[in-house]
Amino acid sequence: MSAAILTRATEMEPQKPLASLTKPLLVVLPFIILLLAASLLPGWAVRVPAGWTVPFVDWANTLIEHMRDDAIFGLFSFRDLTRAIAELITWPLAFVEGLLVSGFPKIGLAAMPWVMTAGLSGVLGWYLKDWRLGLLSAGCVAYMAIFGKWELSMITLSVVLVAAPIAGLIGFLIGILAVKKPWFEALVVPLLNVLQSLPHFSYLIPIAVFIGVGHKAGTIATVIFAIPPMARLTILGLKGVAEEVREAGKMAGCTRFQTLWMVEIPSARQPLLVGVNQVIMQCLAMVVIASFVGARGLGHDLLFRLQALKIGQALESGVAIVLMAITLDQLSRAAAHKEPSHVADATLLQRFPFLVASVLVVMASLLLAAITPYAQAWPSELALSTAPLWDALVDWVTVTFYDPLQYVRNAMLLYVLIPVRDLFQSIPWTAMVALVAAAGWSLGGLRLALTVSGFVLFIAFAGYWERSLITAYMVTVAVLICILVGLPIGIWASRSERRTAIVKLLCDTFQTFPSFIYLIPVIMLFKVGDVAAISAIIIYAMIPIVRYTIFGLRNVPSEIVEAGITSGCTRRQLLWNIRMPLAFPEIMLGINQTIMFALFMVIIAAFIGTKDIGQEIFRALTFNDAGKGLVLGLCVAFMGLTADQLITAWAARRKQRLGLS
Amino acid sequence: MTEAKIACRNLWKLYGADPAGFLKRHAGNPSIETIRAEGYVPAVRNVSFEVMPGEILVVMGLSGSGKSTLLRCLARLVEPTSGEVMFEGRDILAASERELIEIRRHKMGMVFQHFALLPHRTVLDNVAFPLQVRGTDRQKREARAREVIELVGLKGREAYYPRELSGGQQQRVGIARSLAVGPDVWFLDEPFSALDPLIRREMQDEFLRLQKMLNKTIVFITHDFDEAIRVADRIAIMKDGVVEQLGTAEELVTSPATPYVAEFTRNVSHDRLLSVGAVMAPAAARKPDAAAVQVEALLASVARQVLSSERPVDVVDDGGALVGTLSRDSLLDALYGKEQHA
């Protein structure tokens, strides 16, 4: 104890006045000098000369072509292998689809009646949590049937039901291996970092090359996209198992396998199931976007209607996707939080009420389906459509708000977006490298400085510097607005339990929506272009900053708050002198997440005609240019990782200083 | 003489870059200053002791003194840097993984500070767990588990999950689990530290009751000196990884080996610790008084009689022979120190 205090005392330097200011100043100074002196700098220091570009794209394409065309072991090419693997997924996919919607015509078996699907979903919700969740899930299924989204939604659901377990299992195994073998962890964790910051589209392009386009390819893309979060949460969960529990297993005489299987994995049940929740939600988000490579289902329907600018109909599909997202999220979340409790000796019904209920549902719906065809499949002529309603809403909004919306849009463009864009485009690449390197050096020493400037140099020499600056400008504007709006919302919401509950529920709900959904309202309001894109980014990326602000403010140690109150702080003083400084590291982590979310969204927004790096990725997708898609994806990932590395380093240091870590 | 159940010799555990090499460079015995100067963290330094069959050895020290690491070295949950750990006469550090598992499955039980129960298993399944991993069939292991659960007073709670139990009850499950395989050696790592004071006392009584029945060889870790005195046959006091002194509670109090031990034992109430024999004056052989006290009695139990007597009280041994006398003054000296009533 005393030793710790001693070492800390020797580490503390005498504080000079202005010392707190000199360091940030030193970090920004080279940047400002280079920026202001841009006109004096030689051309090569401002724009990356064309001759300097490193042909990353060609290298990547050479590698990909080799994998595509050249045989390994003289037998088959890598592509043959991937296609063969992809073929395997058609089996479970066909089975689940047959069960849910298409039936098995070869053996003359019909699909499950929709009342059975609804009933079983209801029992599942009831089993996992309570009758309310049961009602929600049964209602969601019934909605799909009655509102004419049955086939599309069941196809989407089949993809999720097939992709999620496969992705979950693969991620789980990767996670276990990483925990057990340090060399594998050292290899896989940086890879996971990059994979998790790659935009969705970057996953699609290699898939298109190695597997082709179509429903199968979309499913594979979905699987691959959902693996990293599961791997990460498995690592986190297994490492979080208390050392004592592991020791208890060893002292009981467990072999290594028994320790893993009977002690560690069951003890990490909750984080693992949170991982499953993540996998399911990522699958749903991806299956919507995978419609770009031909995945069928609700996403395809939405894409098709958006392309035709049929906003009302697009909204109808969007609502179905959102409903499915909320239900899947609630169900898998309930599974994660379900705790076992003991049951006294009881009858069969009391001991297995849900099994009994399921059997009853199956029998009742089979009976019902035999009596009336309406219970087997809801007839399409009776399907209700909400599209006219949405169309009316869209018309009303357009007519009523046309002028103010135009005004907002033009003002945004003229006074904010264009000036900021011009400013960004005038930044010399050398200035950017200097800024990032200085920040890295001051926050984490040489190693961090080299890492982050390496990221920026890659972007500069990959040949897409200008495009990247446009992306950076859109993200910056969006993130600043998110902070300006999100921070006050977070502060407001943290003031009382009730507000926190409401805002958290909203955040949880909005976060479950696949990101693509956010394009619908902004197209409705602002048509296409930068304003629409930035609005979509703002809505989507606002969630983490609000969430982390609430979390940070509410988790300030209550003793410190009480010390403030007894010192006679007003509420305002309490906020600015106590809560905010202590919550600030957490809020910065929220901003970090906001940047990541914004980067994801800015790429998806390429769909509505931006001119940034996302548009290039989009084009690469169209031309199946896998090398270009990969390099561009890495550019986006490295932008995110630069911000991420710097901010997390800062927050970790700050937390340590405040004694919060 | 019987053989020691557990013995360790020159046991070292250091944390750092290359502890084994570091130890070798310094002839296997570096000073604490050298260890710290080269950036190593000392957990266990040159510890040697023996635990006899049926004995309760309490290892006592403040947090960071290395007592938990020492215990984990004995159970080989932590690999010692150097030294020797003998378990029933065989070198446990030389045992293969397979042999180690066999030893743990049959000879060792351990109780943990934070219970370390498996949250997804019922009380019954938690207690049966060590039997399950060694392959006992369900019927047998559940019967044995029920037996031990009854032993620790949890009958009726077999179907509960750990989170449905109070802290004291959870630790009873932990104790039951550690006893399920009928081990010879029982390791307890601060078993009652996470419990409320009242429950703690109750559990100490429970522990002593069980030990009276089972007569295990025990290494018991605690940071609470009162607890150590209540349960120990012998106490080892640790500081910075070194055993400062090892002896009975009485020895530690009456002749502390280092200022640290003296500091520790100063505030212990001596009347429940010292026996009459430790403070009496010798007496010439004669026939003892009828109102003599036993030589092994604790001071607390004879204080009233001695203090109310005008002259020294006679002290006798088991056979009733006179072995000394105890005066009012020497009793007061023993209890409150000499200087205070001089």
Image (cartoon, rainbow, N blue to C red):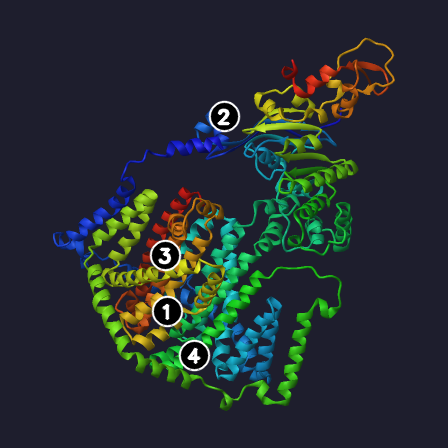
Numbered disc 4: secondary structure: helix
Query: Which of the 4 image quarters holds residue A408?
Result: bottom left
Relative image position of residue A465 (x, y in whole percent): 24, 60
Mark 4 and mark 3 lie on one chain; the one further toward the N terminus is 4
Q: Which chain carries label 2?
A: B
Residue under label 4: A317
Residue A262 horizontal side relative to residue B301, left or right = left
Q: Which is more N-terminal, label 4 or label 1?
A: 1
Q: In this view, does B297 lie to the left or right of A379?
A: right
Picture coordinates of residue B141, whole percent (x, y)? 75, 51
Q: Do the residues bearing badges 2 and 4 touch, measured as CB atoms within 8 Å?
A: no
Q: How crowded is mark 2: few (under 14 residues within 10 Å), some or many (20 or more)?
A: some
Tag 3 residue: A591
Structural distance between the alpha carbons of marks 2 and 4: 71 Å
Q: Point out the frontmost of discs 1 and 2.
A: 2
Secondary structure beneath dot 1 equals helix
**For the residues marked 1 and 2, what is the alpha-carbon distance in whole angstroms?**
63 Å
Judged by depth in the image, the label closer to the viewer, 1 or 4, is 4
Residue nearer the viewer, A49 or A473: A473
Say whether marks 1 and 4 touch (CB < 8 Å): no
Contact (Cβ within 8 Å) of mark 4 with mark 3: no
The nearer-to-camera label among 3 and 1 is 3
